[in-house]
Amino acid sequence: MVPKPYIDTDYRPSSPSSFTSSYSSYDGDKKQRVLGIYGRNHEDDNGYMKRKRIQGGHFVPFQGLVGNDFWHIYDADIKKKKFGDRAVLLQSIQNYRKVSLANFKNFPSEDKEVLQDPRFGEQVIVDCDDDICLGDVYEVTGSSLKLRVTAPRKTTRELDIKNKTKAGLDGICHLVTGTSLAGWFCEVLCEGSMNELSELVLVERPLPQWTLNELAKAIYGGEGDPSATRRCKPSWGRSAEELEVLLALPYLAECGWKQKLRTIKRQNIERQQPIPYFTSSNSSVASILGVYGRGDDLDEYMPRSQVQSATFTQVKGMKNHSFWHDYDEDHKKNYERLVRNQRAILVQTIQNYRRIMESGFECFPETDMQVILDPCFGEQLIIDCPGDICIGDVFAITGSTAKIRVTSPRKPCSEVDNKNHAVYGRKGLRIFTLSTAMAGFFCSVESEGKLEKGSKFELVERPYPKLTLLEIAKAIYGGEGDEKALGRGTGSWGRPIEELHELLDNPYLAEIEFKDELRSILKKIERKNKKASVSVRNNAISLRNLKFEFKSAWIPLILAFMIATISCLMLMGQDIRSRTAP
């Protein structure tokens, strides 16, 4: 019995190609043999891309494998986009063999290991010696199932985690991104079933010039920017006409491919605009180098897209864009409006970027322009600010009614490491920027107004000049109270307790991740002190008891000694009397 499929009445596969009859010679000539079919492993779904081998399955448009929801279905935001061009992910045993030549320690080296534990999140593994081309259509023998190839798989950090390879240049993600070795997506043109040992027969090849390898090389091979390959970023070094041709193809997948081509086009225009640096020596003024809303690259971590200007309001922050403090329902439920306003805007400085560039993170941007085109921390503003920034600082924006107040450094999460292909732990970007306040800072909106690229910030209020962002980050997240806490990315306290209470009483320091963390630290200190006090008191009681027991043990001995002494004296007295008697 075939499980009931997810039905989406609005989704339509791409239009059938007119090339079918022209490529009838492929019928029975170019084949792929199915070696394994895999559904989601719901019994062990805590790991990355866990798969369970099944004998066969039924595939339908949009959803793909019936009874198994993958990313394009279970992610609510992605599901709305109707990415039916990602319905089925296939991988070839030949690609596994090529990747195994890189000698990754935990990667399978034998075909049988691959079939037992697939590593790319695929639903189908095939034996395929032929090049795969964009737009290829395959029919499954003995079934009505028909698939069209839509794109190579564009990899993410999960691939390194799944295969336990290092992040960065030595990882599997870097190896396969520009070489199309991570598999390929297909849309389902006609629903049907597929089993192990089924054959997929090529019946159309409308674009033989666009092999998957050629497509991956053109966009992710660094042809337009050699450093883009190192950072797993798209670039374009071919003609503008070719780019437009790819964008116009009806078969090329939207997510990770057409989206990236549009990003390249946008960034090519932005690259021509001068960066509005601030040139004055006045440290109380800063300039806005970039304004950013949420981007459309849904397969990216913290995607951002540059805008010329935006209006910022209390609580929500940037109008017409939603960020975590605004769209996360649990967050909204747990924190009142005033507290959420403390995270209304995330700001980063170009000075922080430059310091990080000097710190040796191999996949981090190398130039200011790369930063301006593709921010790395999920910020809404990048500013040029040569001076220190302090808790409670108020900046007015020249030519606008907007005023913002600094509430805390950003406590970075693992998304920062993921976004920048950095390792996890103490050597990662998250821990490095956590203790140095280089991940940016949050601001509340004090009064609504418009901010635009090139606008000036002017410092109009500084109530706490000693509480710089760096000092706050060091005090709470610098490991001063517990060196191991730094490696874990948690708070500790090694300064006088009075300073902790002063920070808790500060009216401008943010509740989330800072006052919350300080209260947690304070409770730990109080529990520790209470435990120590009880221990001292117990030790004192034990000492008194010991003295009493010590004294008690001597009493019988003393009595015995006294009795013995008295007895001796009596005997001596009798002896003397007997000697002196007449």
Image: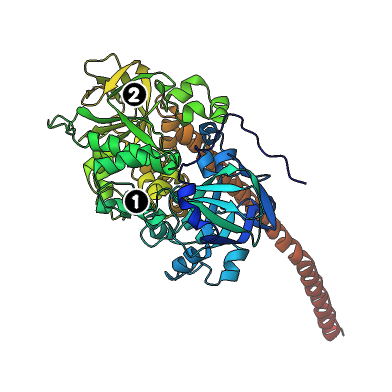
Figure check: 240 above or below 230: above
Q: Amino acid at mark 1?
A: Tyr
- Residue 221 image point, x, y percent: 32, 54
The image's mark for residue 405 is 2
Tag 1 residue: 220
Left or right of residue 223, residue 7 in this image = right
Q: Residues within 10 Å of mark 2 (few under 14, many from 20)?
A: many
User: Could you give the CA–CA distance between mark 2 and mark 1, rounded to whole angstroms?
Assistant: 40 Å
Tell me which numbered mark, 2 or 1, is placed earlier along the sequence: 1
> Foreground mark, 2 or 1?
1
Front-lying residue, 322 or 9: 9
Name the image quarter holding residue 398: top left
- Residue 262 image point, x, y percent: 34, 36
Front-lying residue, 478 or 358: 358
Figure check: 469 above or below 457: below
Figure check: 379 above or below 451: below
